[in-house]
C-alpha cells in the first residue's frame, strides 16, 4: 500500500546497500549471479573463436596466439572455474524445480541430478573427442 | 518455578514519539519450556503493558506471531528461548514490512496481493448442487496438498530480498497459493492467474534466492512454486507461438 493511502504513520526500514553480504545464503546467491558474467565471457570467446576460424588459417593462428598470453590464460582459468560453479549450481536448482514423473512416481531429486550430470559429462566427452580426433 | 532469567532486546516504535525504532531491554523470569511469544506475553503482563505485537493461536496455525528473532524470520510461538540463551534474544518486526507500532507491521499490501491471484476455485461454469460435489482422487489431492499448507504468516516475505528491494513484488506466499489452485483438478482459472503472475512484478521478479522456502514453517516451498509458475508461463507462451491454434491448454 502506498504511503499516501495510509491513515497512520509507519516506519519503513532502509535496505542496506550491502544487504547481500549479511548471510551465507545471500553471498552464495550473489556469487552464482556474478558467475553469469563469466558464462557470458565464455560465450564471447567462443564466438570470437568461430569468427577467427571463418576468416582463415592466419586469423585462426593469430587468435590462438592471443589466447596464449599469460593474462588471457589466467582469465580463462578463472572463467572455467566460474562456469563449472554455475553449471553445478544450475543442475542443483533445476533438479529442485523440475518434477519428473515416471510410471506414476516422482523421480527422486538425486537421480535427476545424476542424470543431468551424466548427460553433461557424455556431451563434453563427445565434444572433446570430436575436437581431438577430427 | 523459574530457572533463572532471560534477557530480551525488543524493538520499540511508538509513532507518536519515535522517529525511528529503538530497542528496549527486558530481563524476565525464565523457564526451560518458554517460547519467545511466552516471553513477550510475560513482558506485556508484568513489565510493560504498552508493548504491542500480534498473536493468537500459540500453536503454529494462525500465522499471526511472525517476527524477526535474532535476525531470522520465525513464528515466535515455535521458537524456544533455550535456542539462544544465555545470549539475549533480539525480537524485531518482520523485515521489509512497514512498521505500525513496536512489532506490528502493516500487512494490507500483502492482503491485496493475495486477493489479486484469485486464491479460490475458479470455474467457467459452476456445477449445480444436484450434480453433487467435485470429486478428487487421493493423487489429485496430493498434487497440490503441499502448497495448500500456507498459513499466511509472511515469514517468506521477510526472508525475500527481492520483496525488500521491490515492494510491488507479488511475493512467495501469494504465488505459491496461486500455484496451489492451478494444480487443483477442480479449478479452471489457470489462464486468468497466468495473466496476473506473468508480469515483471509477478513470478519474473523472483531471482530464486530460495530463502523463502528455508523460512517457511509449513514446508510449502514457495521458491519451487514460483519457478514452476515461470515454467508454466514460458511453455504456454511458447506453445501459443509454435503450435497451431494457440497450443494445448
Image (cartoon, coloured by chain):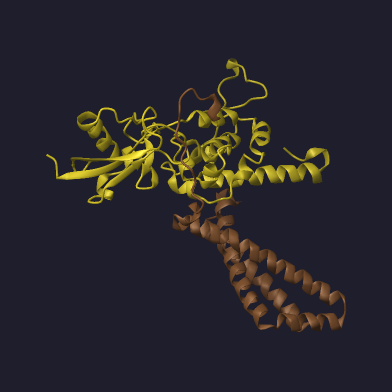
Chain colours: A brown, B yellow
Picture layout, residue B165 above or below residue B124: below
Q: Position of residue A123 (x, y in %)?
A: 68, 70
Residue at 55% in and 47% down: B224
Q: Compare residues B199 and A41 and report the one nearer the observer.
A: A41
Left or right: A28 with respect to B35?
Answer: right
Residue at 80% in and 82% down: A62
Q: Is residue B76 visible in this depiction of the protein?
A: yes
Residue at 82% in and 76% down: A52
Q: Residue furthest left?
A: B1
Q: Position of residue B83 (x, y in %)?
A: 28, 49
Left or right: A86 with respect to B97?
Answer: right
Q: Quadrant of the N terminus of chain B?
A: top left
| Quadrant in the rendering for residue A88 | bottom right
Q: Position of residue A119 (x, y in %)?
A: 64, 66
| Quadrant in the rendering for residue A9 | top left
Left or right: A123 with respect to B218?
Answer: right
Picture layout, residue B152 above or below residue A45: above
| Quadrant in the rendering for residue A67 | bottom right
How many numbered discs, if any?
0
Q: Is residue A1 visible in this depiction of the protein?
A: no
Q: Quadrant of the C terminus of chain B?
A: top right
Left or right: B139 with respect to B242?
Answer: left
Q: Compare residues A105 and A95 and report the one nearer the observer.
A: A95
Residue at 59% in and 56% down: A94
Q: Position of residue A82 (x, y in %)?
A: 59, 68
Picture layout, residue B4 above or below residue A39: above
Amino acid at each position: 500500500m502506498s504511503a499516501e493511502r495510509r491513515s497512520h504513520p509507519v516506519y519503513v526500514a532502509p535496505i542496506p546497500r550491502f544487504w547481500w553480504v549479511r548471510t551465507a545464503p545471500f553471498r552464495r546467491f550473489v556469487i552464482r549471479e556474478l558467475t553469469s558474467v563469466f558464462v557470458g565471457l565464455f560465450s564471447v570467446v567462443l564466438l570470437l573463436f568461430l569468427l577467427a576460424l571463418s576468416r582463415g588459417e592466419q586469423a585462426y593462428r593469430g587468435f590462438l596466439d592471443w589466447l596464449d598470453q599469460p593474462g588471457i590464460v589466467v582469465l580463462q582459468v578463472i572463467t572455467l572455474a566460474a562456469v563449472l560453479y554455475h553449471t553445478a549450481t544450475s543442475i542443483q536448482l533445476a533438479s529442485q524445480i523440475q518434477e519428473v514423473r515416471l510410471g506414476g512416481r516422482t523421480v527422486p531429486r538425486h537421480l535427476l541430478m545424476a542424470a543431468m550430470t551424466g548427460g553433461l559429462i557424455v556431451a563434453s566427452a563427445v565434444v572433446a573427442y570430436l575436437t581431438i580426433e577430427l | 518455578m523459574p530457572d533463572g532469567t532471560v534477557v530480551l532486546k525488543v524493538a520499540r516504535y511508538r509513532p507518536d514519539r519515535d522517529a525511528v525504532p529503538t530497542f528496549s531491554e527486558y530481563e524476565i523470569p525464565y523457564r526451560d519450556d518458554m517460547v519467545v511469544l511466552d516471553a513477550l506475553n510475560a513482558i506485556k503482563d508484568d513489565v510493560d503493558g504498552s508493548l504491542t505485537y500480534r498473536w493468537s493461536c500459540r500453536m503454529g496455525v494462525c500465522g499471526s506471531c511472525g517476527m524477526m528473532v535474532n535476525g531470522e524470520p520465525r513464528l515466535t510461538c515455535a521458537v524456544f528461548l533455550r535456542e539462544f540463551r544465555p545470549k539475549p534474544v533480539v525480537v524485531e518486526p518482520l523485515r521489509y514490512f512497514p512498521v505500525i507500532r513496536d512489532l506490528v507491521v502493516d500487512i494490507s499490501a500483502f492482503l491485496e496481493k493475495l486477493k489479486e491471484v484469485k486464491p479460490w476455485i475458479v470455474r467457467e461454469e459452476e456445477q449445480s448442487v444436484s450434480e453433487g460435489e467435485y470429486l478428487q482422487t487421493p493423487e489429485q489431492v496430493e498434487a497440490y496438498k503441499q502448497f495448500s499448507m500456507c498459513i499466511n504468516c509472511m515469514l517468506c516475505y521477510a526472508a525475500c530480498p527481492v520483496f525488500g528491494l521491490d515492494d510491488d513484488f507479488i511475493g512467495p506466499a501469494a504465488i505459491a497459493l496461486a500455484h496451489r489452485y492451478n494444480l487443483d483438478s477442480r479449478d479452471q482459472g489457470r489462464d486468468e492467474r497466468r495473466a496476473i503472475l506473468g508480469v515483471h512484478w509477478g513470478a519474473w521478479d523472483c531471482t530464486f534466492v530460495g530463502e523463502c522456502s528455508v523460512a517457511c514453517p509449513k514446508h510449502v516451498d514457495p521458491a519451487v512454486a514460483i519457478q514452476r509458475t515461470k515454467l508454466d508461463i514460458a511453455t504456454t507462451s511458447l506453445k501459443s507461438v509454435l503450435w497451431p491454434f494457440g497450443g494445448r491448454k
